[in-house]
Amino acid sequence: MLEFKVTRNSDGNISHIETSLTGYDLLNSPKLNKGCAFTFEEREAFHLNALLPHQVETLEQQVARMYAQYNEHRTDLGKNIYLNVLHDYNETLFYHLVKQYLEEMLPIVYTPTVGEAVERFSLEHRKVRGLYLSYPERDRIFKIFEHGLPERIDLTVVTDGEGVLGIGDQGIGGINISSAKLMAYTLCAGVNPHHVLPIQLDVGTNNPNLLSDPMYLGWRHERITGDIYDDFIDQFVKSITKKYPHILLHWEDFGRENARRILTRYRNEICTINGDIQSTATVALACILAGINASEIPLKDHRIVIFGAGTAGVGIADQIVSTLQEAGLSPSDAYQRLWLIDKHGLLVEKNAELLPFQKPFAVSSKRIADWEKRNPAYIDLYDVVKNVKPTILIGCSAVHNAFTEEIVKMMATYLSHPIIMPLSNPTIKSEATPADLLQWTEGRAIIATGTAFPDVTLVGGRKIRIAQSNNAFAFPGIGLGTIAVKAKHVTDGMLNAATHALSQCSPANKDKTAPLLPKLSEIHSVSRQIALAVAIEARREGLAEIDGNTDLNRAINEVSWNPKYYPYRKI
């Protein structure tokens, strides 16, 4: 158990840290280790003399050295591994370094590079991080949470590794996603990393490469399904919420058959959010609202096609429907503004393959009776775009280059500024590149992508920064606001507040030719605005469990954390 206590001044800021750890125990504690930044007085008090080189460094001097070492690595995966090793022995230095070079390093520790790290988890495994709950040990879950865990955890990111990014079932490699998400919470919003826990639910894997890999570290068994899976999830939820009643439970990268069902089952019982469904939708909708301002077409007049009707695609569609109803449309009219396409083609009512969460978006045969179709048995993206003439095209399919030149140019013939959002990641799964989209539309497309792309220079020298619809613009702020007020639930109202707070930060509100989202370097201030909006809405709905007289900005400050060194005193 980590032994330290944070002492604060009357203004709520940290004054010093008290700990009983000494010597190698202190140096081996990543949450407390300061390396060569320990002062001579601290070295004497904590028995560190001769365990460190003589020179006492500042945090900034350490960052300079770490950045030089970082640049010695030539591949993104190598840089990811280096930064994770740094995180494992000095968290403060890690967060200070990455925060200082956020635009460069967030794509390394988070998406897209984390996808490669997930695939190589068993090969690159170095140090245990987080909690691994395996189905064969299901009868011990309650005991696991009763003993040996920190007394305070505010947030967990949990995955079962079935639907990782666009690369599918990765078994227990999903723990790297949980860890990366928690890093993003801290880097982007200042959520305290001392009070978070990554969790992997090991329920087997259906990935034949993992099952046959002698290095695979997970349970070698096909994934459990049905009632035994649901019972395992329920046992986990009851155990963790008994231990941590105020915890925010963030579900991530579950398979689409399970993700929405789990969220629906628990969202009104515990404080929980699904990143793939809700935070992805929050950022996408914020981009859409900003893009609508630039397109000069009222929201209610837009026709929206979503290619990919899985967890993320339907999550985005749900929030769009809610926003359309806020704009005055009836539920039926709102649903009729959207057309969703899955692997079986356009969602049509008669399709027996429809999943329950897709059915509200299924189109009646009558509405498409007069359509021109290339293949009567299968209505593909081309057919939908040709007949619907969408004003907004969103990709959540993980199908590389699905937005072809033919389709994009067809959109550009009837629109001055088509809104096109290829949101799949990593890069090799993106439906199109911004450079192609701008070339095919003569620079007129309004674009947001799911992965980071470089600026595009148009003919004539005009340079365009591409907005990344990265859900890191949403979930860290939502989480910070939720934790600050100890919200009982995460509601649609709180998510809507987050969406509007983010859309108000769009540079396109002031300049219609500007990107739809701020720069990553601005994400910390954006997250604070989202956190405050979420906290205000939680209090308005009667869901905040902190004192009603508490200043919300102060509440947010008190649960926030900055990567800096503090004086140490011995307990």
Image (spheres, rainbow, N blue to C red):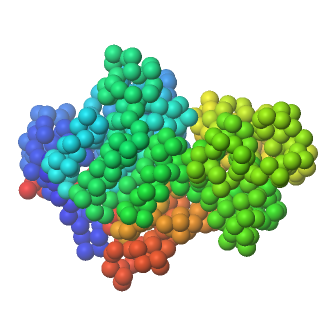
Q: Is residue 526 left or right of residue 15?
A: right
Above/below status of 552 relative to 356: below
Q: Position of residue 76 (x, y in %)?
A: 49, 28
Going by the image, does 279 lie left or right of 238? right
Horizontal and vertical percent for residue 170?
44, 30
Which residue is farthest bottom? 549
Q: Foreground residue, 321 or 508?
A: 321
Residue 401 seen in the current view: yes
Foreground residue among 229 and 114: 229
Residue occupying image coordinates x 88% and y 52%:
416
Residue 499 in picture, x, y percent from top left: 59, 63
Position of 464 compared to 484: left or right? right
Identify the image quadrant of the C terminus: bottom left
Vertically, is 266 above or below 427?
A: below
The answer to which image quadrant residue 360 occupies is: bottom right
- Left or right: 58 in relation to 16: right
What residue appears at the point 62 percent right and 32 percent down from the top-left corner?
A: 429
Figure disc tally: 0
Q: Is residue 48 above or below residue 184?
A: above
